[in-house]
């Protein structure tokens, strides 16, 4: 428990103090946020805002995680390191995308195929590694099985599992990326989901099958360290959010949004709550579906009638409400509330299943 508190606390302080330093560095280098020509006119005020802020909480997460273990004299685990490496790998893909945008002074960075290829490579490497590194009980960070609240069904094999891991991680990172765009929206919504994984990790540790066998126990390799990872990333995000809250002094960019989606998927895989993530991160699912519906309906009606129709004024969903007259702060706070409700529902399902076991 001390490791969780120290990891989160150190990461929070590191991000809180480190972010203004990065802001000054970005301004000195002239690394400002480009704005799409076809984007919302209200976003023109964000032009030139320092970007790539996601690098701050990624670094702070590593600092908090390491400090928590050093200060409590506990060893790091394969699960914890691999989840953080997954987050970092996705952050590097986003960093390249952000840097190209700044270098070219345009809203277009990596081509979509190149960005996807980078995400897939990271996901495949980490997905394979998650099936390795057994502990003294023979448990690996992940099993080649699907999971909801625990593993279920037969072993699906290495290749199908890696494909599933790619779908999960790439899907989650792009979902958070779609939710980014309003100051504090993606960061604040992710913090709530990370808090849920702190609780899940603690609960699984207290009901660990390696400690005692029962119908209610969890066969998870490093549940407590998953809570430490979640707390460290959450602390980094809270410290960063102090400067990212409206009006943002810095923008996370794809460096941050891809990283956050990656770490959420990694936590879900290693705590064996893969499908539960769809409920806990329900806000990101809703935002993603709004974009899918918008594109799908537009293309379908254009084929049928020759003129595409739109369901929303603009997608993703947050921009629809912005064009409907809602202020940015109103949208962000209400979306945070929706994220909190999704997390409450997910945790209720998690706990109810434990009671019925």
Image (tube, rainbow, N blue to C red):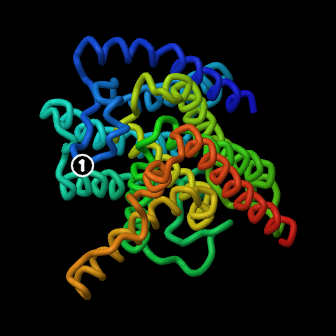
Q: Which residue is mark 1?
A: 38
Where residue 231 sits, quadrant-wise, is top right
Residue 140, visible in the rendered structure: no
Q: Is residue 310 left or right of residue 131?
A: left
Circle 1: element type: loop
Spot occupied by residue 91 in the image (x, y as percentages of width and height): 35, 39
| Residue at 75% over, 62% down | 350
Q: Nearer the viewer, residue 249 or 211?
A: 249
How many numbered markers are drawn? 1
From this view, report whether residue 156 is shown above or below residue 104: below
Q: Is residue 206 left or right of residue 234?
A: right
Spot occupied by residue 30 in the image (x, y as percentages of width and height): 23, 18
Q: Nearer the viewer, residue 41 or 274?
A: 41
From this view, report whether residue 264 is shown above or below residue 314: above
Taking the view exactly as shown, the residue that stands out farthest to the bottom is 304
Q: Nearer the viewer, residue 287 or 87?
A: 287
Q: Is residue 91 left or right of residue 107?
A: right
Residue 212, visible in the rendered structure: yes
Q: Nearer the viewer, residue 136 or 247?
A: 247
Q: Is residue 117 left or right of residue 220?
A: left
Where residue 270 sits, quadrant-wise, is bottom right
| Residue at 46% over, 67% down | 289
Q: In which quadrant is the N terminus drawn?
A: top right
From this view, report whether residue 271 is shown above or below residue 234: below
From this view, report whether residue 32 is shown above or below residue 36: above
Spot occupied by residue 36 in the image (x, y as percentages of width and height): 24, 43
Spot occupied by residue 59 in the image (x, y as percentages of width and height): 44, 27
């Amino acid at each position: 428990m001390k490791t969780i508190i120290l990891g989160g606390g150190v990461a929070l302080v590191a991000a809180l103090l480190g972010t203004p330093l990065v802001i000054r560095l970005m301004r000195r280098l002239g690394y400002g946020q480009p704005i799409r020509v076809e984007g919302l006119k209200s976003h023109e005020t964000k032009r030139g805002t320092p970007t790539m802020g996601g690098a701050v909480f990624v670094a702070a997460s590593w600092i908090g995680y390491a400090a928590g273990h050093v200060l409590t004299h506990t060893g790091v685990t394969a699960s914890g390191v691999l989840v953080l490496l997954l987050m970092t790998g996705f952050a590097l893909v986003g960093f390249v995308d952000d840097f190209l945008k700044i270098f070219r002074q345009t809203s277009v960075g990596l081509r979509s195929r190149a960005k996807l290829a980078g995400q897939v490579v990271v996901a495949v490497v980490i997905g394979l590694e998650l099936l390795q590194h057994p502990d003294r009980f023979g448990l690996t960070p992940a099993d080649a099985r699907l999971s909801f609240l625990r593993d279920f069904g037969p072993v699906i094999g290495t290749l199908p599992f890696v494909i599933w891991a790619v779908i999960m991680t790439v899907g989650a990172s792009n979902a958070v990326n779609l939710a980014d765009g309003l100051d504090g929206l993606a960061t604040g919504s992710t913090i709530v989901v990370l808090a849920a994984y702190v609780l899940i990790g603690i609960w699984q540790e207290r009901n660990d099958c390696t400690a005692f066998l029962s119908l209610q126990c969890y066969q998870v390799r490093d549940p407590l360290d998953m809570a430490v990872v979640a707390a460290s990333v959450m602390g980094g995000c809270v410290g960063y959010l102090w400067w990212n809250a409206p009006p943002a002094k810095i923008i996370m960019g794809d460096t941050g949004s891809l990283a956050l989606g990656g770490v959420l998927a990694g936590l879900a895989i290693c705590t064996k709550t893969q499908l539960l993530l769809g409920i806990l991160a329900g806000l990101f699912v809703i935002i993603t579906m709004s974009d899918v519906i918008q594109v799908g309906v537009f293309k379908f009606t254009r084929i049928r009638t020759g003129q595409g129709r739109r369901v929303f004024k603009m997608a993703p969903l947050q921009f629809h409400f912005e064009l409907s007259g809602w202020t940015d702060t109103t949208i962000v706070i209400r979306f945070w509330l929706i994220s909190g409700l999704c997390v409450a529902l997910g945790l209720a399902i998690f706990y109810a299943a434990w009671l019925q076991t």
